[in-house]
Amino acid sequence: MKKPNSALKKIIGPFMMIALLFVGSCARQLETSKASNNTTEDTEENFVSKIDLSGKRIGYCTPSLNAPYYQALFQSIKATTENNGMTFLSADGQNDINKQIAAVEDLITKGIDALLLNPLDPDALVGVTKVAKAAGIPVFIIDSSIDPSADFVTTIQSNNLANGELAGEWLAKKFGKKKMNIALLSGNAGNPVGKTRKQGLLQGITEEQLRTLGYIDLDIKTQMYTNWSYAGGLQAMEDVLVAHPDVNVVITESDVCVLGAIKAIAQAGKTDDILIVAGADGQKEAIKYIMETDFYGCTAMNSPVQIGKNAVQYAIQYMNGKTDFPKNSYTAPLLITKENAAKYYRPDAIF
């Protein structure tokens, strides 16, 4: 049995220090967020408008359409907009900050009644939100985050901190006193959503270990960036397996970061030796792995369909005179494991 003092000696590197800080600070952050922002969960999908929506125009700018998640979010916003009798206008940022800025400016000039914006960069898109406000157009930030200095009504996204915490807690319970040698696969450096998911994962692990073991034994061998892509995940995992062959756990900020990694793990013959845990998204391929294998342990729900519905409904409520929106509006946190995966698996879904 590992003594607390020997375990604590391993908590010296930067990740270990971060984890210790998260135990207190992230818990306070979550409670403060709930109190100060009055965060909400899923909105009513059948909100009845008191005004005629037939002449209203909803503009949506995506950072890219080069991913199933973005495609599913696009289709959800389009369908919800049109099902409510409004006109849907869209623009694609093409994974380029300058192009997304230009795309938003183009939507503004077309006279939209609400702008739904999924910003590629939290700082670069601040200016266009101020342009929209000057034009009398309310801005709703969806899926990602933007700097607080921006002019926007609310941010609509999944509860990344709470979802990550659920996944981290599940992992700590699964391993108990068994040693975890962890590789962390992230999206890209500085991404605010990825950072929050990572905080949740580490907080969930450390809180559960303190609760059940009375000490923290957290050994993160490396952090690798995948650029939120299949190819990036494959390359990152290949590098991990060469540099750290003793890794037995992969934690990740998104299903997409690790789907490519699975190929590398399989090629190395280590599907029986490595457990994967994702802090988000509930992508159908990940859910299928959870249902059919033992190496993909869990993921957390980040539903593009629900986020798209919520975003349009909030825009409708704003048009109907509602102004008291919280600055953060979350969908409900949900962990997907082998026990409930079949309930959420949709083989025909885009994402």
Image (cartoon, rainbow, N blue to C red):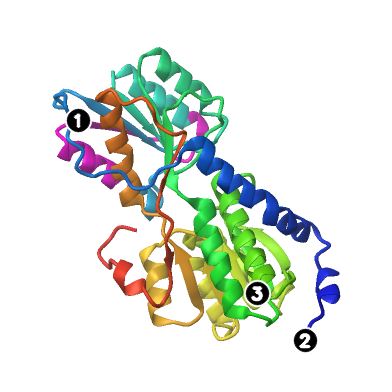
Q: Secondary structure at mark 1?
A: strand
Circle 1 is placed at which residue position? 87
The magenta stretch spans which residues?
Answer: 73-98
Q: Position of residue 253 (x, y in %)?
A: 55, 58
Q: Name the mark on residue 212.
A: 3
325 to 219, vertically: above or below? above
279 to 86, vertically: above or below? below
Q: Name the mark on residue 1.
A: 2
Residue at image location 62% in from the left, 52% down from the top? 27
- Residue type at numbered disc 2: Met
Cα distance in 3D space between marks 1 and 2: 64 Å
Residue at image location 54% in from the left, 59% down from the top? 164
- Residue type at numbered disc 3: Thr
Left or right: 232 in relation to 156: right
169 to 319, vertically: above or below? below
Specify which label sits upstream in the sequence, 2 or 3: 2
Circles 1 and 2: CB atoms closer than 8 Å: no
